[in-house]
Amino acid sequence: MVKVKILKTSTGDIVSFEVKGHSNFAEHGQDIVCSGISAVAQTAVLGLNQFINNPPKLKIEEGYLSCSLPGSLTLDERGRANIVLKTMALGMEMIAQSYPQNIRLVWQIVDH
């Protein structure tokens, strides 16, 4: 199962996300659930790199991706990052609704 953890502030700003594990929906290379999750997560990273000046902190390994926003974002960058990350979260929620045995979405509120 893939676990997607999204950390947000009490005001609703997403500050980081982590994707880990394998969906085990199908064989490696044919797993549409894993491919969908990876595409949504990696597109969010691309969007952040495109629309904010301070790149996010990334860690990418086999079956693992974490992405954390820097604390030094301007108000405008924070708004653009929220659009990208909330869109990513919507994509993950849709995949989780369709494949609940293969992906678990966890929201966590943090003081940031």
Image: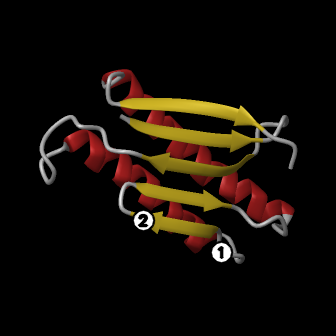
Q: Residue at x 79, y 63 (%)?
A: 76
Left-right relation of 48 to 104: right
Percent position of residue 105, x then y: 51, 31
**Numbered badge on residue 46:** none
Which residue is disc 2 drawn over? 61
84 and 31: which is toward the camera: 31
Percent position of residue 48, x then y: 59, 65
Q: Residue at x 57, y 68 (%)?
A: 58
**Numbered badge on residue 55:** 1
Residue type for callout 2: Glu
Q: Could you tell me how many numbered marks the image carries?
A: 2
Q: Bin the neighbour count of mark 2 within 10 Å (Cα to Cα): few under 14, some 14-19, many 20 and up.
A: few
Q: Nearer the viewer, mark 2 or mark 1?
A: 2
Which corner quadrant of the image does residue 29 belong to? bottom left
Q: Bin the neighbour count of mark 1 within 10 Å (Cα to Cα): few under 14, some 14-19, many 20 and up.
A: some
Q: Is residue 98 above or below residue 92?
A: above
3 and 84: which is toward the camera: 3
35 and 82: which is toward the camera: 35
Q: Residue at x 32, y 30 (%)?
A: 102
48 and 103: which is toward the camera: 103
Q: Residue at x 73, y 41 (%)?
A: 8
Left-right relation of 76 to 24: right
Q: Tell me which numbered mark, 2 or 1, is placed earlier along the sequence.
A: 1
Instruction: Give the structural element (helix, strand or loop) at label 1.
Output: loop
Instruction: Give the structural element (helix, strand or loop) at label 2.
Output: strand
Residue type for callout 1: Pro
Q: Is residue 72 above or below residue 102?
A: below
**C-alpha distance separating marks 2 and 1:** 18 Å
Percent position of residue 4, x then y: 50, 40
Percent position of residue 50, x then y: 56, 73
